[in-house]
Amino acid sequence: VVKSNEFRATFVEGIGERPPEDVGGEGGYEGYLRIMADANHPEYEYMKEWSDNQKERNISQEKINHRLKHVIKGYRYTYFL
């Protein structure tokens, strides 16, 4: 067993938007994508408005790394060799 005194997670790059919060897991996300791909779907307008309210505004690499730093603060990563 190796114990590290430090564990880092760093966001390097990315494009696009994260899935909306509370979309309902993998199955909910699949349903969300299906609805958003069909502008004629009865739930399309509702889902569009809801997801627009879920989007990150003014997110940057620095903000993401700041969040990651605080999320893993004090975390110890242990693994087997």
Image (cartoon, rainbow, N blue to C red):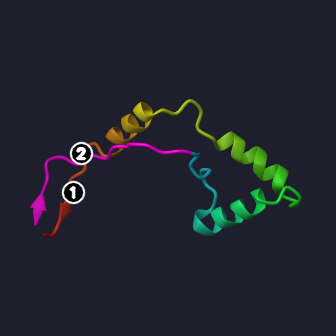
User: Which class describes the residues within 10 Å of circle 1: few (<14), some (14-19), or many (20+)?
Assistant: few
Horizontal relation, residue 39 to residue 67: left or right: right
Residue closer to the observer: 50 or 81: 81
Residue closer to the observer: 51 or 40: 40
User: Which class describes the residues within 10 Å of circle 2: few (<14), some (14-19), or many (20+)?
Assistant: few
Horizontal relation, residue 49 to residue 75: left or right: right
Q: For the residue labelled by badge 1, is the local secondary structure a helix, a strand or a loop? A: loop
**Which residue is label 1 attached to?**
77
Q: Quadrant of residue 68?
A: top left
Disc sitting over residue 46 in the figure:
none
Which residue corresponds to the image point at 74% horizontal and 64% vertical from the top-left? 34
Most common secondary structure along the magenta stretch = loop
**Which residue is label 2 attached to?**
74
Q: Amino acid at mark 1?
A: Tyr
Q: Tell me how far mark 2 sits from mark 1, CA to CA.
A: 10 Å
- Residue 50's spot in the image, x, y percent? 73, 46
- Residue 2's spot in the image, x, y percent? 10, 61
| Residue 25 magenta-highlighted | no
Q: Quadrant of residue 43?
A: bottom right
Q: Amino acid at mark 2?
A: Gly
Which residue corresponds to the image point at 23% horizontal and 48% vertical from the top-left? 7
Horizontal relation, residue 17 to residue 31: left or right: left
Q: Is residue 75 above or below residue 60?
A: below
Which residue corresponds to the image point at 13% horizontal and 48% vertical from the top-left? 5
Q: Quadrant of the C terminus?
A: bottom left
Q: Quadrant of the N terminus?
A: bottom left
| Residue 13 magenta-highlighted | yes
Which portion, as a residue range, is magenta? 1-15
- Pointer 2 with pointer 1, Cβ within 8 A: no
- Residue 47's spot in the image, x, y percent? 77, 52
Between tags 2 and 1, which lies in front? 1
Q: For the residue labelled by badge 2, is the local secondary structure a helix, a strand or a loop? A: loop
